[in-house]
Structure formats: structure tokens, C-alpha cells
Amino acid sequence: MSLLLALACTGGPDEEVAPVANDSSVPAELLAGTWQVRVAAPGGMDAFGSAGWQAMFERNATGALEAFGPQGVESGRVHVQAAAAYRQAACVAAYALVETYDGDERREGDPAEVEYLLGVSRVVLGQDDLASGHFGQGGADESLAAADAAWTALAAEPIARAAWDDDALFPLPAVTAGTLPAVVEGPHYRFTIEGATLPLELADPTALLQAAWWHEAAATQAMGAPAANALLGPWRLEIEEPGEQAAELPIEALFLSSWSSADDLAFVNALVATEDPTSVGATVESFASRSAYAAVVQGCLSDAGVDPDCLEAGSRSLANALEASMAEAGGQVSADHRMFAGFATGGVLRAGARTEDALGNEYNAAVLRRLARDASTGPAADPVFFVALSAYHASTRNAHTSAELLHGQISFVPGLYGARIALDALNLRVQRDSGPGNPGG
């Protein structure tokens, strides 16, 4: 049984088949450069038979780090995923806190200490101009008051970064690649509310931020800053600078990811960095000759934006073309070819959503993310993407869907439950405001 089939858990033999024609508009040379086709070639899977890669296939970050050890691209890859997951979980908590306690959402009886949490939330969401006014309020809870004082000082900096070893916050051990430190689980604060039978429990997004920056530093230790910056690029917060990004990445940085090639990832990073919507078309065109994803997006892009139906069809055509190319490269059909091609189906749709983000078309971006979610199943269900989807739904006050998406990823790395606590508070607020006849959420 081939190693590819062992990963797919099929147990059946490969079948000898004739090469299948490429029915996609993507040039054959772009398909040949994808990790899917490269691993399908004879000997292509030889480097991926370890326990670490089995753990990656199972989305088990703890097991992967234990197997990979402290150095190398593989270890750095796991740390980048952890760093990205913590960032997106911090966004979940931040949106939930803002939608529960800020502005017109404030209710009589809410503790004054939520001002501090709103300040942290505004930092997470890149709204520094709104953050500083929330800090410096103090509070009866000693640990919150200490954290408030620490953030009051941080908020004066152009980019506020809470140190992961700050004793006033939620200190983590010295950065050591290959390890997965425990994150201080929420709730971090409890307040007695007049007339309530139970205390109000709240979690601080700071703990998630510190974990995110800790794992970024660990990724840099393991694989170097340029590679870590490239992989982390799509998930950075608005307060962060992208840093130098590697133009080339080894296959170990991409295998079992939604980016089929380094150029697909570079395409998305370029879209993230786009500030002028009128330049998006040129960006897509410049990558279309070297990124399969950009080539598919270009075929569906017009002055009105990306056509979701066209891109969904294009993603399926690309997956079919990848299957055909894998069979041709390996000289046989293998049961895992379709599964591997599925990573690209969701990846193309996510690239389309990023294109719509850069164009400012929020509705179409949401449609494409939904299509990408539906296409990202089994091993292709990227936990970071699903936590990011949870953050999106929290921003729309859809606490129920946000919690469902987050719940499926809580076991990926420790400490994500803190974001769920903020969602619970939002869900209660939405239910109370909606009334018994219209529960909302």
C-alpha cells in the first residue's frame, strides 16, 4: 500500500490508468509546480511518512510539534498555524466584546471594567484611535487593574504589542521552538452584578495575543523570519507590519495546506497588502502567469468583481485538472488524489474572497467565504480559516454560528476557549435584546 493511500486510510491498491487530459484553463506548467502534483510523482511522498506529518494530517498541533522537534520548516509551520489561530481567536473575542459592550450596546449593570477589555479589543481590530480612551480606568479587580496599567503604557506606542513575558498580563515561558506552552485559560475576571444570580465571567483577548506573538517568535527560531512572515501574511492583524517575506518556500511549508504553491500564497499576500482597489486587477494579472489561483480568479474577474458562480466552477475545474496531473505524474490513480485536490478547491475560493476584500465588495467576499467553508471538508478543513470565519460571524452579531465554528477548533491549540467566553456574553445579550419571541443569534 502506498504512503499516499495510508494517509487517505483507504487500504485499496492504486490503479494503472492512462493520462487524463487537463480540462482547466490553467497551464500545465502551473499545475506541475503545485505540492499536489509534486508529491504524486514517484518518490514524492518519501519525506512525508513521519509521525509529525500524520499529526499534521489529523490537525494535531501538539503531536506534530512533539514529533518534529525544535528546528526546521516542519516545526516552524506548526508554530505559524498556532500563531495564526491565536490571532483569529483574539479577533473573535474582540468582535464579541465590542458587539456586547461598546457604544449603544452598553446596558445598565455592565461593570465599568469592560472599558479595559474594549480597549484591548480595539487594538486587536486595528482601531488605535478608539483604543486609548478605554484604558486607564482601573477597576476593583487587582489583576485587571494591573493589566489596564500595562496596556495604558502600551497604547502610547505606534504598534501596541503585549510582551509574552509581562508579569502584569499573562506571562508565558521563554520562547522555545518545538514546544506548545499552556495559555492561561479564561475566564480571567469575574464580577458580581447587582440583581444577577451568577457572576459575570469575562476573558481577556490579551492572553490570545501573547500566545500569537510567542508562536511567531518560535516559528522564526525554527524556520527563519522570511518563511514565517510569508506563511503568516494572510492572518496578520491590522496593527502589524508584514515584514520580509520569502519568495520561495520548500514543499514542507506548503504540503497539506490550502496554498498549492508559493506563488498562490504570494498572490494572497499581495491582495492583503493592497490599499488601492483600482490596482487589484493589475495585481491579479501580474500573478496569473505564475499562480494557478490567480489564473482562475482572473478568468472570473470583471469590473463588477469576482463572479462567485464562475469561481466555484473554476475551483472544481482546477481540482479536476490537479487530479489528472497527479495521475499523469505518478502513472496511476491513487485514492488520495481527489482528497489532495480538495485543498485547492477551498484555496481558490478563499483567494477569490481576498480579491473581493481588496476591491471592497463585502457581500461577494462573504459569499465566497461561505463557498470556501462548504468546500473545505475533512483534512482540507483548515482550523485557522474556520476560526477566522468565526471572527467574521462575531462581527455581524451572529454569536450562534460564530460559536459553532469556533467550537470545532478549540482542541487545535490550548487556550482558545477564552474566545468562546466572549461569544457566550454576546449570545446572552442578543437573546435578551431580541426578546422571548425572537431569540436571534
Image (cartoon, grey):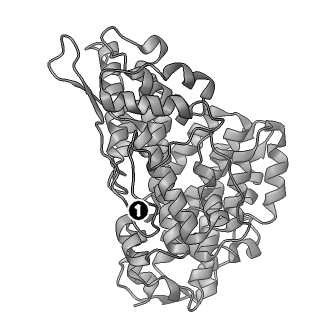
Residue 227, given in percent of the width and then of the height, sits at 64, 66
Residue 144 vertical position relative to residue 243 in the rendered view, above or below: above
Q: Determine if residue 60 is in view.
A: no
Q: Quadrant of the C terminus?
A: top left
Residue 186, given in percent of the width and then of the height, sits at 30, 40
At x 76% / y 76%, what residue is drawn? 29
At x 77% / y 52%, what residue is drawn? 298
Query: 33 or 122: which is nearer to us?
Result: 122
Q: Give the quarter of the image for residue 188.
A: top left
Horizontally, residue 104 falls left or right of residue 431, namely right
Residue 272, given in percent of the width and then of the height, sits at 69, 46
Q: Quadrant of the N terminus?
A: bottom left
Horizontally, residue 393 falls left or right of residue 415, namely right
Q: Determine if residue 411 is in view.
A: yes
Q: Give the quarter of the image for residue 158.
A: top right
| Residue with the most extreme left position | 197
Query: 15 or 36: which is nearer to us?
Result: 36
Residue 53, given in percent of the width and then of the height, sits at 44, 76
Residue 238 vertical position relative to residue 23 in the rendered view, above or below: above
Residue 394 vertical position relative to residue 42 in the rendered view, above or below: above
Disc 1 residue type (three-letter): Gly
Query: 376 or 232: which is nearer to us?
Result: 232
Q: Give the quarter of the image for residue 369.
A: top right
Residue 376 vertical position relative to residue 199 in the rendered view, above or below: below
Horizontally, residue 272 falls left or right of residue 425, namely right
At x 53% / y 68%, what residue is drawn? 76
Residue under label 1: 378
